């Protein structure tokens, strides 16, 4: 079967750095997405990785290792507004998205 | 403004009373999809559509119907709602699914449905 694993909840301090991991086992691979979702709101696109390596976008970076079935989202200089759930999703061989259950990130002052 | 619009945003209904949640996008996207989101379960796909008149079941299609008569609209129909369909529903669209980079989803604001 297809599976995406990510931690259920993480806590970090304002100004610090946090890494949210995602491991996957899917039928084929056509890319991995990270979305941010604030409570009660719609998910919004953060990043897309299809090749191995690190993609940096301001305070957020996303890393992919296809051979290990592993990705992480790195958030630097954490702000209170970063408190949200972070969803990992993999595009499989049929171009269907397989979603993880999401990681709830709590930022403390 | 490029967006996905879904209505109603909030609805409380009773078991068995048919309802429709509308979804419309103004980006000329080919691909549209409906998800439900429940605590601890993440996003689960109900139905999706690759283009006009083409719809397919997702992971949890039971109790739902959809149609795609026009490119911009993709309504979700609950013929006989039951309490286990109480959930937060999201409509989403993307340019296409033929190319990985075109798969970025734009989501509607969500529709919170309660079935008593």
Image (spheres, rainbow, N blue to C red):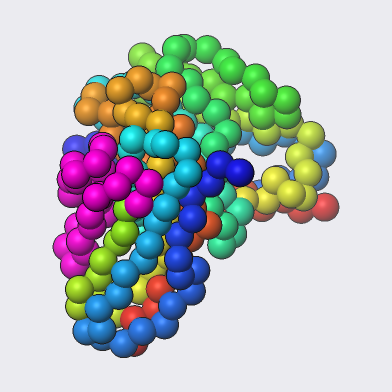
Is B9 located above or below residue A55 in the figure? below
The residue at the point 57 percent across, 24 percent down is: A62
* Front one among A16 and B32: B32
Q: Look at the image and tell me whether residue A100 can be seen.
A: no
* Front one among A49 and B112: B112
Residue A16: quadrant of the picture: top right
Is B41 located above or below residue B107 in the figure? below
Please say whether residue B66 is one of the residues in the magenta stretch.
yes
Q: In this view, does A40 lie to the left or right of B73?
A: right
The residue at the point 76 percent across, 39 percent down is: A78
* Image coordinates for residue A109, horizontal then vertical, percent: 82, 52
Which image quarter holds the N terminus of chain A? top left
Q: Which residue lies furthest to the front in this view?
A: B70
* Image coordinates for residue B40, horizontal then vertical, percent: 41, 59
* Image coordinates for residue A93, horizontal then vertical, percent: 24, 24
Please say whether residue B27 is one of the residues in the magenta stretch.
no
Residues in magenta, as a range: B46-73
The residue at the point 36 percent across, 84 percent down is: B13
Q: Look at the image and tell me whether residue A67 can be seen.
A: yes
The residue at the point 30 percent across, 75 percent down is: B19
* Image coordinates for residue A47, horizontal then vertical, percent: 55, 28
């Amino acid at each position: 079967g297809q599976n995406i694993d990510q931690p259920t909840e993480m806590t970090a301090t304002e100004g610090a750095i946090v890494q949210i991991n995602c491991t996957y086992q899917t039928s084929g691979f056509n890319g991995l997405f990270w979305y941010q979702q604030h409570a009660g709101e719609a998910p919004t696109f953060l990043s897309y990785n299809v090749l191995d390596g690190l993609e940096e976008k301001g305070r957020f970076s996303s890393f992919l290792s296809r051979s290990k079935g592993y990705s992480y989202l790195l958030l630097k200089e954490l702000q209170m507004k970063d408190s949200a759930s972070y969803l990992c999703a993999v595009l499989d061989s049929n171009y269907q998205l397989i979603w993880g259950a999401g990681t709830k990130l709590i930022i403390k002052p | 403004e490029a967006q996905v619009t879904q209505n109603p945003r909030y609805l409380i209904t009773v078991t068995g009373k048919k309802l429709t949640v509308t979804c419309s996008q103004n980006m000329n996207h080919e691909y549209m999809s409906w998800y439900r989101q429940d605590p601890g379960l993440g996003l689960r796909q109900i139905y999706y559509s690759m283009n006009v008149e083409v719809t397919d079941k997702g992971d949890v299609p039971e109790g739902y119907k959809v149609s795609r008569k026009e490119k911009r609209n993709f309504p979700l129909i609950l013929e006989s709602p039951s309490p286990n369909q109480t959930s937060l529903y999201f409509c989403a669209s993307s340019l296409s699914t033929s190319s990985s980079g075109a798969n970025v989803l734009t989501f509607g604001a969500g529709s919170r449905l309660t079935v008593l």
